[in-house]
Image (tube, rainbow, N blue to C red):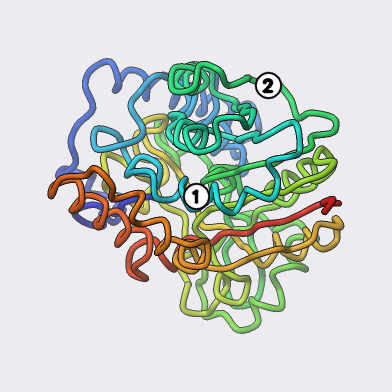
Amino acid sequence: MRDTGPGFVTHSPDRRKFSLPPPDLEAAAHSAALRGRILARIAAAGGSISFADYLEAVLYTPGLGYYMAGQRRFGPDGDFVTAPEMGPVLATVLARWLEDYRNLGDGILEFGGGSGALARQLRAILPSTPYAFLDRSADLVAQQAKALPEGRVLQDLPEAWRGVFLAHEVLDALPFLAVEWDGERLWERRVAMQGDDFCWTLAPLAAEHAATLRPYAEHWPAPYQTEIRPLAEAWLAAAAASLAEGALVLIDYGQESSEYYHPQRRQGSLRAYYRHRVLDDPFFLPGLCDLTAHVDFGALRRAAARLGLRERWYGPLARFLVEGGLAELYPGLAAGRDGRGLLALNNEIKRLTLPQEMGESFKVLLLEKTLLK
């Protein structure tokens, strides 16, 4: 979950974020070093890079990117909170959905396992199920190993996995392209230099992406800004090729294509998260902010069908929890808790199910491949 915190801070070129907690000297130097490296990359590229390349740099530069350095990301002391950090409700219901795949010998492979909280919770419920991680961040891999010492760490996709692929808040973190419609043409929003800072510049959008978006663009007001995620579909194709038998579970915030590209969503979903504040300035403190955008689940579902994956279940998180037996599992979740513990459990369930919280904004897509009954 990306918590919007105490307020939405807009970007203004003549006023920086005076109300935000300042970074300490070490973090500020870290961000400045990454900024300098990206500026040099822009200069070497002739004056601009794609926003996907900018995202790759700010999120994944070894030792400097947001997910590749050692800063605190998850929980109250970080920048955002995810469902597993709140408690065991998601893992408890998810484990019931995964019961059909327990006899497939490879177990669960979690992509981008974060702090390892979800893995630890699932393993406690399914103790005989093997568990593995695949993550680009050495720092996060270390956290996962601490949370689940018996978990295996993979360096690449396996050739033929028989079990479950689990991606919780992974696709939103894949680099994506930023797009703008001016009423006549579709443009790619690229990142350029303005002194020692970053700015937007426009270039023609590649024909393949323009063809995908034009049916929606004909109904957009101008100007209209949005995103497109070719890497998400490429990731799904690679995962489908690696999965020999079993299930692929995607949990993330997003919408169907018709809603994602609705005319009223004229500012897109690109956001930066810093200390539980949400900003619309993706250039603020590079390396210290999480950058993300919603996932187009319509595009994923169409890609899954082309890849031969069978859709077992799709819908909002709240319905996934209810249909997965949350009411039946509640007594076990509540057992042994005192009044404060019950209050925390009930608040966790509210945040996961209420439509104004995560209940509607998060979606779950459960896909299957050659499952043997």
Amino acid type at image mark 2:
Leu
Residue 263 seen in this snapshot: yes
Which comes before the other along the chain, label 2 or label 1? 2
The residue carrying pointer 1 sits among few (fewer than 14), some (14 to 19) or many (20 or more) residues within 10 Å by Cα, namely some
Image side of residue 337 versus residue 270, left or right: left
Closer-to-camera residue (100/90):
100
Q: Nearer the viewer, residue 362 or 26?
A: 362
Does residue 84 sit above or below 327 in this rendering? above
Q: Which residue is mark 1?
A: 200
**What is the three-letter code of the residue carrying label 1?**
Trp
The residue at the point 30 percent across, 37 percent down is: 75
For residue 325, side relative to residue 280 (left or right): right
Q: Nearer the viewer, mark 2 or mark 1?
A: 2
Q: How far across and how far down the image is residue 316, in percent? A: 51, 67
Q: Nearer the viewer, residue 66 or 78?
A: 78
Q: Secondary structure at mark 1?
A: strand
Q: Looking at the image, which residue is at 42% across and 45% down?
A: 282
Measured along the vertical axis of the image, is residue 266 above or below residue 317? below
Q: Secondary structure at mark 2?
A: strand
Residue 109 position (above or below residue 82)? above
Which mark, by number, is residue 66?
none
Residue 214 falls in image quadrant: bottom right
- Taking the spot 37% from the left edge, 25% from the top edge, the residue there is 31
- Look at mark 2 in the image and give the residue it sits on: 154
Q: Residues within 10 Å of mark 2 (few under 14, many from 20)?
A: some
Measured Cα–Cα span from mark 2 to mark 1: 37 Å
User: How many numbered callouts?
Assistant: 2
Q: Nearer the viewer, residue 328 or 323?
A: 328
Location of residue 254 in the rendering, given as x and y in whole percent from the top left corner = 53, 62
**Callouts 2 and 1 close, C-beta under 8 Å:** no
Judge left or right: residue 21 versus residue 328: left
x then y, percent, for residue 366: 66, 57
